[in-house]
Amino acid sequence: MRIAFVTMATAHHVNDRHARRVRSVAERLAARGHDVVCCCAQWWDGDHPAFDFEGITYRRVTAERTPRAFVAKLPFVLNSVRPEVVHVATRPPLAVPAARAAAHLRRAPVVADWWDVPDGNGNEKAWERSLAVRSPNAVVVPSRTVATTVREYGADPDDIAVIPDGIDVATVRDAPTDTRADVVYARQLDAHANVEGVLLALAELRDRDWRAAIIGDGPARSDAERTASDLRIDDRVEFLGDLPPAERIPILKGAHVFAQTATWEPFATELLRALACGCVGIVEYQTASAAHELVEGDPRGSLVTGPVELADEIVAAANMERWSIDEGYADYDHEAVASRYVDRYERSIDDYGLL
């Protein structure tokens, strides 16, 4: 299958969850033998309009990440690619109708990958976001929580496909175990991290025996470290910074509890990885977070509404058996997730052929 990915900013430009998600899917599909072309702003050196890397052909739409120019030039580039299906990121949102206009001429369906943003739409207008979900043949979202947002912008519920982020289950199985921490929190430490919720819960348990690790880095780290000191638990909470998976997974396998308190999370990838590592997942419910979806129906998981309940659940988890892997989350393996994308593409191609 010839698949055109459209994303102005790639993982070679920025290190964010959306760019990483697109790159992961594109590279795995290329490894399966699909012909994958990524139409993007240029990130490679030189004047050549295309660059092959990790099995993907990157095609230049613009030299710079300029949304207006990117949208204007995209149809011409897509027309030369001749894709069977177009997978387009919804930032900038007007790239979706631009991709649809070009793909329509070639009878190729468009699948939009919704890029959720916290606290509104930033510089994007509501009508642009609405057009981004109304234009494609299908909209892919990482969670039911994000699906609700997409429906509110006007997407047809029948056109929405929930496809989660993936994890490397084989790496989880093969990784060693590091028992330095009983309780772990892992996430980028930004304005939505809410690490304080975990620290307040641990402070409730200062008379009990526990060790905790905070994995991640970002602008909120210094405030979190100061909070741990103010609560007089800094000698039992280790801030480890942003660790690569090879170092992060052993700590998760050795821990017993993973605490999820972030206020915004379109898909809780770190929680998923921890659950696959056998952690008891305790999620503080947040209206802008999809983390609760991963523990619903999991007998080892629970939902709480604040630090006191979180502390109670950490105590209750002590009565559960320690695991270093949970095969119940094997369906989230990268390859299984890639297969779901292929199924969605094939269904869109079949449906488009009936129009």
Image: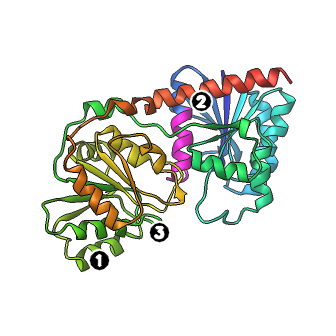
Residue 338 visible here: yes
Mark 2 and mark 1 residues within 8 Å of each other at the beta carbon: no
Whole-percent x and y of residue 87? 67, 36
Q: Is residue 243 above or below residue 189?
A: above
Q: Quadrant of the N terminus?
A: top right
Q: Is residue 84 above or below residue 129?
A: above
User: Residue 341's mark?
Assistant: 2
Whole-percent x and y of residue 302? 37, 50
The residue at the point 41 percent across, 45 percent down is: 295
User: Residue 302's mark?
Assistant: none
State how far apart marks 3 and 1 are (Cα).
15 Å
Which is the main secondary structure of the residues drawn in magenta?
helix
Name the element at disc 2.
helix
Q: Quadrant of the C terminus?
A: top right
Residue range highlighted in magenta: 13-26
- Report the front residue among 58 and 188: 188
- Report the front residue among 354 and 64: 354
Residue 49 in which image quadrant: top right
Residue 69 in which image quadrant: bottom right
Q: Which residue is mark 1?
A: 226
The residue at the point 62 percent across, 24 percent down is: 343
